[in-house]
């Protein structure tokens, strides 16, 4: 492995770890704020957000933002 590839792997590992810690903190905070019975809603919310972050939405930002808001408000 080249040195550059190792740096990329380290950065990806650090990013994934940071995302995991952030997800865990969000879910725990959601449980504290809304109760243990509603943790599944917190998990589904963070999962949806992560999926939507992977999708390219810069072509129509206003329309996509409205769609995302409808998804969370009416789902």
Image (tube, rainbow, N blue to C red):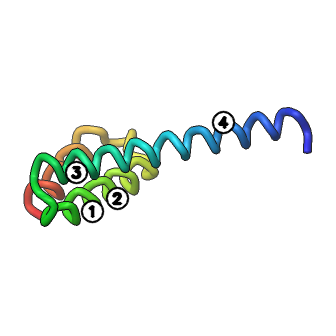
Q: Looking at the image, is mark 4 or mark 3 earlier in the sequence?
A: 4
Quadrant holding the N terminus: top right
Give the mark toward the camera: 3 or 2. Answer: 2
Q: Nearer the viewer, mark 1 or mark 3?
A: 1
> Going 16% across and 48% down the picture, which residue do you hit?
32
Mark 4 residue crowding within 10 angstroms, few (<14) / some (14–19) / many (20+): few
Q: Is residue 6 above or below residue 49?
A: above
Q: Secondary structure at mark 2?
A: helix
- Residue 75 placement: quadrant: bottom left
Pointer 2: what residue?
47
Name the disc covering residue 11, or none. Answer: 4
Q: Report which quarter residue 15 is drawn in.
A: top right
**Circle 3 sits on which residue?**
68
Percent x, y of residue 34: 10, 52
Callout 1 crowding tier (Cα within 10 Å): few <14, some 14–19, many ≥20: few
Q: Would residue 12 be found to the left or right of residue 6 on screen?
A: left
Name the residue located 16 percent from the left edge and 55 percent from the top edge.
72
Counting residues from the N terminus, which is met first, the one under dot 1 or under dot 3? 1
Please report contact status of discs 3 and 2: CB closer than 8 Å, yes or no: no
Viewer-nearest residue: 12 or 29:
29
The CA span between labels 1 and 3 is: 14 Å
The alpha-carbon separation of the residues under discs 1 and 2 comes to 5 Å
Mark 4–mark 3 Cα distance, whole angstroms, equals 29 Å
């Amino acid at each position: 492995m080249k040195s550059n590839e190792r740096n990329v792997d380290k950065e990806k590992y650090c990013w994934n770890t940071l995302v995991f810690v952030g997800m865990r903190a969000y879910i725990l905070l959601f449980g504290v704020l809304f109760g243990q019975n509603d943790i599944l809603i917190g998990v589904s919310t963070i999962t949806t957000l992560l999926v939507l972050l992977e999708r390219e939405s810069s072509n129509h930002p206003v329309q996509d933002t409205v769609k995302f808001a409808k998804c969370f408000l009416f789902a």
